[in-house]
Amino acid sequence: MAKKNTNANKKNNMQQATAGDVAVDVQGVTKHYIIRHQKSPSLKDEKKDRLLKGKDTVEEFLALDDVSFTIKHSETFGIIGSNGSGKSTLLKLIAQVLKPTKGQVMVNGTVSALLELGAGFHQDLTGRENIYLNASILGLKRKEINKRFDQIVEFSELERFIDMPVKSYSSGMYMRLGFSIAINVNPDILLVDEVLSVGDQAFQSKCYKVIYDFIRRGKTIIIVSHDLETISDLCKRVLFLRKGKIELMGDSIQVVSRYRAYVEELERIRIAEQQKEERKKIFKSIIDSKRKVVAAEEIEKLSKIDGGASFEGRFGKGDAEVTKIEMSDEAGNLIDFCKSDAVAHITLEVKFKNLVENPIFGIRITDHRNSVVYGTNSRLLGIKTGVYKPGDKLKVTFGQKINLIGGHYFVTISIGHKDGKTYCDWINNVMTINVLRKNNSEGIADLNSEMIIKQI
Amino acid sequence: MISNFKKLIAYRELLFSLTKKELKVKYRGSVLGFFWSLLNPVLMMLVYSFVFSMILRQGIQEFAIFLLCALLPYNFFSNSVNYGSGSIISNANLVKKIYFPKEIIPLSIVLSNLINFLLELVVLFIVLSIFGYKFYMYLYLLPVVILVQVLFVSGISMLISALNVFFRDLQHLITILMLVWFFATPIIYPLSMVPQRFQFWMQLNPMAVFTSYYRNIFYFVKYPEDMYWPSLEIILICLGITFLFFFMGYFIFKRLEPKFAEEV
């Protein structure tokens, strides 16, 4: 059973507060949702279902799975995770709106939840009336509202509109009023769910000022956001939820960077899935046509829609073939990751099956969004490669400094004919380079900024 | 239980502001505003007087007043239950986002209808004085009767509003149920018109007992020979049923409350 504490029973709060400096204690919390499928494929089926079972078909959804953590007073705590990971459910459990299926949630102190701004506004009432209504829903007494009324109005910048019904407000005005009320309730614990993106720049910076003010005054703040900058900026400790379980919890920089990597991975998988079909279609058309020569435009197309490090994206006439590919550091040790700024050698072994004159050896590095980060080939570099007979073997090494910000990058290799239009062998995304993340910059390219600050 | 009540008391300000909201919203946009609460019973009386003195003639004297002093309390009951039944669902945004004792929602509807009822009673008092009814004779009984009725109405409202979250068909059934209840309560007819052997059973309905009291206080003061005071037995049964419904409504509401946020 969850123990509830609201401003309603302050006495109780006082007793529990002396128990320690824990603001929120979540112990072994599991939350099931029951999803009812109301729409069966046909009306007849549905009727049968209803008659047989007397109920809609029911599915259980596990939103949170045995989650435990504690938040101390005066802590700013962030919760991150992809959609459906259980963040909002967790926040609602702390706000006491939901009850856990198993486990317990203990809260010490008054809670104000910015779950949805303006929840409970009544369209036909004026801004003034809604302030009184909403603030009393959030637990304020009339006297307290009277005292804070001017502050609320001033903060919302709605002085001129305060006696108009809120249905005539723009969505921005609506949110501003909601935010102003919620923060002026002055709770011990503030729950914030994706609401810091309210209003224009000026209002937003005001919101941040208020949040910082809260932090300075030693209030406990729990923030759920997809905005990782905000999270790592505001929070010391961050919880990363994944499919209802705690993936990682701790120092915000560490957790946020792990989450970033996870999101990138997800994004890469998503793109790969999405493009798999299209890729298959084009390959099928190439294979079906039994052409030995593939036109450059088609290769261009194929290389753009690839994803996933597999040999699936391989084609070519077969006059020469890549038989091996590896990456090593400057000392020649094989590696599968490297540091930003380090030199990496990518070496291919090539075997010739027919006579090939002046083949063009090419390399291309792409990021997870399939944008080309870097690419070059022997022709562009002005290297004469020579003539090779069937059975000849060759070792080709590309050496480059990896001036990249951390993340996953993919290597595509090609051996082209001298006409520059057809290929002996092309392998898409044959290798992944994992670049260790540096936490001093963002983006793709590492331009190694040096900052100089001088007083003038 | 006691802590729940304490919480409810702590949130009384919210109860009042939600009640205020209900009243404000009801008349927002209309020119006469809350005067409608006063005007409504007057207009109703005019219509009933016309219908029952010109078209449907029967033997009851000053039928409009006879009717009104039972109809107003009944309307308080049926409006509260009708509006209350869908109240949790229509306040889904609050239920899902903010923590507070949810029984405040149906109770605020009962309270706003009570205020409306009291305003209508003021109009009734004026009409009664004009027609020479000495309604002040038994007026001391009125607060007690109203209080007991409020308990009964609150219980039913909480019960129905909670059940309606899970069985949405209820809301449609309620309209019909209220109509049946209307005819099962001696409102458009006197209890004396009911065959003797059914009278006891009819009075198991607390609304029937309340009606007897309202009618004695307002109407039969002018015709004391027709006054009917329910027996002690019936009074005790009525109180028993009222408390039963109140606590049952409250307990079932509290039992189902944690599930509201997921179901609405």
Image (tube, coloured by chain):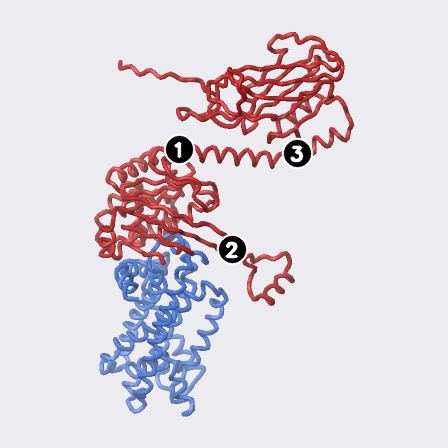
Chain colours: A red, B blue
Q: Which mark is residue A278?
A: 3
Q: Quadrant of residue A191?
A: top left
Look at 46% across and 23% down and name the residue there: A405
Look at 31% across and 69% down and name the residue there: B114
Q: Chain of mark 1?
A: A
Mark 2 or 1: in front is: 1
If the image is split into quadrants, where does the N terminus of chain B sit?
A: bottom left
| SS under mark 1 | helix
Pointer 2 residue: A60
Q: Are marks 2 and 1 on the same chain?
A: yes
Question: Please, is residue A397 above or below residue A88 in the view?
Answer: above
Question: Please, is residue B51 above or below residue A47 in the view?
Answer: below
Q: Chain of mark 3?
A: A
| SS under mark 2 | strand
Q: Residue B201's x, y, as percent?
A: 41, 86
- Kind of residue at badge 1: Gln
